[in-house]
Amino acid sequence: MSASRNRELLALVPVALLLTIGFAAVFAQNDNQLTNLSLSYGLYFLAICLATHIYIRIRLPNADPYLFPLMALLTAVGLVMLYRLDSELGNELARDQANWFVLGLILFAVVVHFFKDYSVLERYRYTIALISLALLLAPRLPLIGSQVNGAYLGISIGPISFQPAELAKIGIVIFLASYLREHRELLVVGARRILGITFPPLKHLGPLLVVWGAAMFMLIFIRDLGSSLMFFAAFLALIYVATGRLSFVVIGMAMFLAGAWVIYNTVPHVTDRVDIWLDPYQDPSAAGYQILQSMFAMADGGLFGEGFAQAMVVIPGTDAPLLPAAQTDLIYTLITSELGLFGACAVIAIYLLIAARGFKVALMANDGFSKLLATGLTTVFAFQAFVIIGGVTRVIPLTGVTLPLVSYGGSSILANFILLALLLLISDRARREAREGI
Amino acid sequence: MNSRIVKLFAFTVVMFAVLVGFTSYWTVFDSQNLKNERVNKRPLFAAQKIERGRILASDGTVIARSIRKGSGASLRYVRDYPEGSTYGHPIGYSFIEYGNSEFEAFHNSELIGDDNEFSTIFDELRGKDPVGNDIKTSIDPDAQATAFSMLGDSPGAVVAIEPSTGAIKAMVSVPPFDPNTVPTDFSALNQDPGSPMLNRVTQGQYPPGSTFKLVTAAAALDSGAITLDETINSPATIDIQGNPLANSDNSDYGDIDVTTALTFSVNTYFAQLGEDIGSGTLEEYMTKFGFNAKPELDLPDGQMSVSGVFDDGELVTGDDPIDVGRLAIGQERLLATPVQMAEVAATIANDGKLMRPQIWSEVRDPDGRTVKEMDPEVQSNVISEETANQLTEAMSDVVNEGTGTAAALSGIDVAGKTGTAEIPDVERCDGLPNQAWFVGFAPADDPQIAVAATVECTDGQGGTVAAPIAAAVMQTLLDG
C-alpha cells in the first residue's frame, strides 16, 4: 500500500519540475531573465499536489498510483500553455485555470469523502440520468442558455458560466454502467437472430433506444456534434463490454450514422460543420479559417516544433487571431506548432497512459458495476481527447469540446477531477479486495 | 468482461494511432504543401520576423533598413528607405504584401541571412530568429544626386560603370519612385502613365541612334574589314536597300576614314561600312558586347530587358532578313537599354574587355565582418586592345571637335559618342520627337568611369541634351 503511494509521490516530482521549467521558459522568453516567481509557481503547484497526495494516502491508500500524477501532468501542460498565451495576449487565463485546479481538487476530496461507498450511486441512477439530461438541455433554455458558434454548449447564471455537458458525461456513464450491470444478461439471453444479425430483445431495447434518441436529440437541439459523438461512443463501448455482442455495436453505429446522415441533411449548422471538414478551402477566410489555420500552424511545427512560445497566435502587430480559440479548441495545435510532432505524441501518450491505467482499474474491479463504471469513465475521457484532437487534425469535423485538463475551462477541470475521484475510489476498493484476497 | 475491456483498450490504441498518423501528416509529410498554400499567410508573417539586413551606398549611407515594430511574439520588422526616391531604382522595395523587387529581390537570401548554412542550423536549435546580412553597394550618393539634378523632370536614365571592375557607380531613372510609398500607393504607382516603377536603365528599350556606330566601328576594325586609314566615299545621300539615306547635316564628306566618320557621325559612311562587314559579323560583335541577352547585372531577370533588333516584340537573330546598312547607324528596329550602351563604352574604356556589371560590392554579417566581396569578372573579351585604343582616339575627337563638345570637362580628356534617335512611338511625347543619347568615358588615357545618359521625348540633340548630363556625372565621380 505504501509502495503505490510512494510511487505516486515520486511521479509527482517530475510533474512539478515540468511546470516550473515551463513557467521559467515563459519568463525567460518575455524578460530575458529568470525571476524566482516561476520557481514559486512550481512550489505552489507541488504543494497543492502534495496535499492531495497526502489526502489520497489517508483516504485511498490502495488506489492506482499513476492516475493522479498523469492528470496533474496534463493540468501542468495546460497551465504552461495558458501562461504562455497570457504573456502574449495579456489575459489571466492561467491564474483562473490554477484556481479551477484547486477547486477541482477540493471537489475531488469532497467526492472521495462522501462516496467512499460509491455503489449508492446505483440507487439514484434514474435521478442521475434525469439530472444529466436536464443539464444537457439547459443551454437551450431561455435566459441562462448561451450559443457559441451555432452550438448550444453553455449556461450562464450571473457571472458564472458553465458547460453542463462536462458534468452530464459523468452522470450518463453512471446511469449506463448501473443499467447495463442489471440488464446485461437479459440483453444477451433474450436476443434473437434475424437475417444473421443478433438483435437485443425488444423489451430491453427501449432504454437503449432512449440513449440513441438522446444522442440524436443533442445533435439537433444542442447542435453539439462532439459531445454527442463522445456520449454515443461511451455508450457503445459499455454495451460491448457488458454484453460481448459486437453486433449490438454494429447496429448502434448504423443507427447513429443513419441519424447523423438525416441530421446532416436537415440541420444547417451540422451541414456547415461537415462541409467545412470535407473541404475547408471552400471558405478559407471565414468558416474554414479555424481548421485551415490549425493545419498551417501544425505544418510550421514539423518534427521538433518552432520552439516554445514561438508560434504565431495573432497576426503580428494586430489583435486578429491567427489561431482562433488557441486556449480551448486549438490548444493541441498550439502544442504541435511549438513542440512539434514529438511534443504532440507526448501529449497523446499521456492520454493513452491514463486510458491504460483506467482500463486497468476496470480489469481489477470485482463487481460488474465497478467494472462498467471504470470502463465508461475511461472511455468517455479518452474519447473526449480523441474528438477534439481528431477535430483539429481533420480526422473528424471540428467541434467545441475541450481537451481534457489541458484546454482552458473550469467545467472541464471540475468534471475531470470528479471523474478521477470515481476512478480512484473504484481502484482503491478493487486493490484492497485483491490484497485481502477476496 | 475482462477480455472485452482489453479489446476496448486495443481499440483506443488504434484510435490514438490515427491521431498520431494525422498529426504526422500535417506536421511532416504534407508540411511543404501547406506552407506553399496560397491562403497560408504564416510564411509571410514569419518573414516579417527576420531583421532583414541593411543596404548601404559606397560611402556607408543607409539606403534601406529594417525598423523594429512591437515586441515579443508580435515583434516584426518593416522596411524603411531613409533616402526616399534617390535609390528607388535600382534598390527596389521589400514589403510583405507586395513582395520584393530589383536589388532587394535579387539579394533576398543574403539580406535575410538564408545563405549562411551553419549559423542558421545553430540558431534554429536555439530557437533564435535568423538575422540578415548587410550589403554594401558601389553606388555613389554624389553621382546619384548629380544625375537627378541634371535630368530634372525629363524622363530619362543615367548609368555609370567603373570600366575596370564593372562596379555600378550610379543608376538613375526618371521619374523615380519612393519605395516608402509602395505600401500605400502601390496601385497608383503601377498605373501612373509616367511609369515611375520602370527602371529605365535596365528595362527602358530605346533606339540607340548614332551611339550604336561605336559597335559598328568596333566590329569593322576588330574583324579587319577596314584599317584605321582606309577611306570610304561618303556623299550627302546614298541608296540603302532601295531607299535613300542622308547625313543628318546633309553634308557631302567625300573620302573619309573611320575617325572622321565617328567624329561627325556620318550616316552614309557607316551604312556602307555595315553592308561591307555584313549582318553576321555585326551580330557576332553585338552579342559579345552583351546584346541579344539580358544584362548580367545583379537584378532579377524579370526587371531587365534584352537589347537587340526587335520585330513585333520578338528578338530578330540569325538568318532573319535585316537591313544591315540601317542597323549599322542604330536604326532598323534596333532597341537598346541604357545599361547596354554603358557596357559598350565601358568595354572600349577597359581595353576591349567587358567586365560583368554588378551593383553590390560587399556582404557583411550582422557583426560587421565581411562575408564576401565582389570579385570583378570578365564577362567577355569583345575587341582587341588595339581596336579599343583606336576607338578611344576617335571618341576623344568626338568630344574635342565633333558632335559631343558639350561633354568636355576642363583639364580632363573625355571620350564619347552622341546619338539622336527618332522615337518610334512618338505619340506619347507631345510632339517632342527625339531620344537623345551620350555614351562615353573619362579620362580618355586612363578611364575611371564610363557613362550612358539618355533623355526621352526631347526636341534637343544628344550633343546638347544628354552630353552635359553625362559630363556632370563623370565630373562628380572623378572629383569624388
Image (cartoon, rainbow, N blue to C red):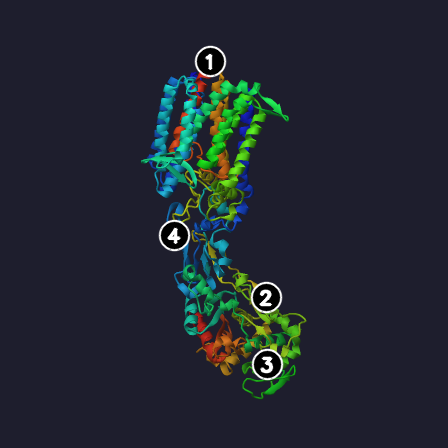
Residue type, numbered disc 4:
Arg
Point out residue B22 in the picture as x, y percentages from the top left corner. 54, 38
Q: Earlier in the sequence, mark 2 or mark 3?
A: 3
Chain under disc 1: A
Q: How many angstroms separate mark 3 from mark 4 (CA)?
A: 60 Å
The answer to whether residue B407 is seen in the rendering is no
Asked if the residue at tag 4 contacts the one at tag 2, i.e. Cβ–Cβ closer than 8 Å, the answer is: no
Q: Which sits in the foreground, B152 or A284?
A: A284
**Tag 2 residue:** B293
Q: How many angstroms separate mark 2 from mark 4 (CA)?
A: 41 Å
Q: Is residue A315 left or right of residue B117?
A: left
Q: Which circle marks residue B258 in the picture? A: 3
**Secondary structure state at the residue bearing disc 3:** helix
Pointers 2 and 1 within a single chain: no
Q: Decide: few, some or many residues near mark 4? Use Cα within 10 Å; few <14, some 14-19, many ≥20.
A: some
Pointers 3 and 4 within a single chain: yes
**Tag 4 residue:** B68
**Tag 1 residue:** A433
Asked if the residue at tag 4 contacts the one at tag 3, i.e. Cβ–Cβ closer than 8 Å, the answer is: no
**Extreme residue toward the top, this view:** A437
Q: Residue at x 43, y 61 (%)?
A: B182
Q: Decide: few, some or many residues near mark 2? Use Cα within 10 Å; few <14, some 14-19, many ≥20.
A: some
Point out residue A192 in the picture as x, y percentages from the top left corner. 60, 22
